[in-house]
Amino acid sequence: MDSQGTWIRKKSLLQKIDIITQMREIYQKIPELIELDQVGAYCTVVETKGSTPQKPGAKLLILPDLRNIGTLGGGCVEAEARRQAIGLMQGGEPRLLQFQLDSDYGWDDGLICGGNMKIFIDLPRTRAEAEMFTRLQGLNAEKVPLIFATVVESEQQGVDVGMKMVFAANGERIGTLGNSSLEADVESQISTVLEENRASVLQQNQTTSIFLEPLQPRPTLLIAGAGHVGQALCHLGNWLDFDIAIIDDRADFASTERLPEADEIIIGDIAEELRKYPINHLTYVVIVTRGHQHDESALHSVVESDARYIGLIGSRRKIKLIFDDLLEIGIPIEKLKRVYAPIGLDINSKTVPEIAVSIASQLIQVRNGAEKPQAFEAQPAQMPTIKL
């Protein structure tokens, strides 16, 4: 808090996790409400500037009995958005709200964020919308990236506020935005929006605003090594909404008893199993095996893959030795530069849980499209003596 009492809230890991979890719950609930001929108010933060309690993509679904799923950040903003949304549920139309987070929308304890937020209140009620939300869940289960586009402002003839369209990376299109030119504009943004993985607003001719929300499938965390760090990361990764696959050549370590959160446990030669694994842009590889040779062979197996993230545990000296060996056998330096090594964010971690949190933090940083993901600038003086 500064001298004027302005409060700056940093987006926490839990905040992002909650958004993902709540989104899935909301997308399941909307078709159920429509099937029962009930209307819920589907509220989404579509744009923010400055310091705000939530970021674009945060959601709140107000049910007919006025219970909530999700949050827009709490405080007076959510209370006012909720009040207006409840009014619209009685036969109203979708609407875009704008809030300046000044003294009028401060928190109960007097803290003021100082930014501004735009919140779109949607009222899905048609059979077509129910089918669209149901298909969204199906595409997500099939691991198909997509953009969910919603008209939040419009002065164009035939383009109504609340119109929606799904643009899936497999070419599937569901719904309409009411204008082929507008749809073509969204088409041209698909690659960029999916790559940045950040919700944004597309404006056309200052008359129409489209909220573009990238919906990425649940990614896979592929852990090489089922020792103590791998075990801790398996637990954290599941909580952070990753599918978990873990590989080790020790059956007593790679067991369901030790790794109950794992979706897939593979027992076999680590390097060989990594080469066989279907790694793609939704795969995050973490190498935490029990020794230098295993780490090197594991990295060799995945370094030229399409993995979104590759991280390698160890000291700078060990990593330099591994990199030198791989360069000598012809691995391009550009491929090695992709590797996050030493792995994790620098939180001066010493214990196994702390190391796992450091790695998990970096995974989220990359998954959420940080503009400049930061690797270690300095390694702690001495890594903890642990059995990987």
Image (spheres, helix red, strand yellow):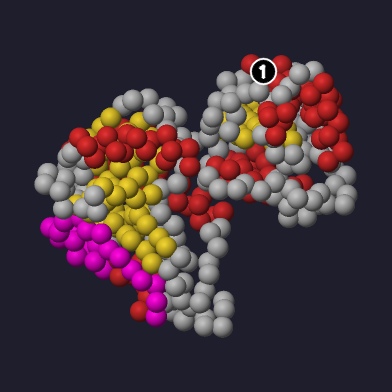
Residue 9, can we see it?
yes
> Of the residues shown, which amino acid type is indicated by label 1?
Arg
Residues 40 and 116: in front is: 116
The residue sitting at 24% across, 66% down in the picture is: 84
Image position, residue 204 (x, y; %): 26, 47
Question: Magenta residues?
Answer: 82-103
**Picture quadrant where residue 173 is located:** top left
**Picture quadrant where residue 188 is located:** top left
Would you say 298 lies left or right of 82 here? right
Categorize mark 1 by other alpha carbons within 10 Å: few (<14), some (14-19), many (20+).
some
Location of the N terminus by quadrant is bottom right
Location of the C terminus by quadrant is top right
Q: Which residue is mark 1?
A: 275
Number of numbered callouts drawn: 1
Residue 34, can we see it?
no
Secondary structure at badge 1 equals: helix
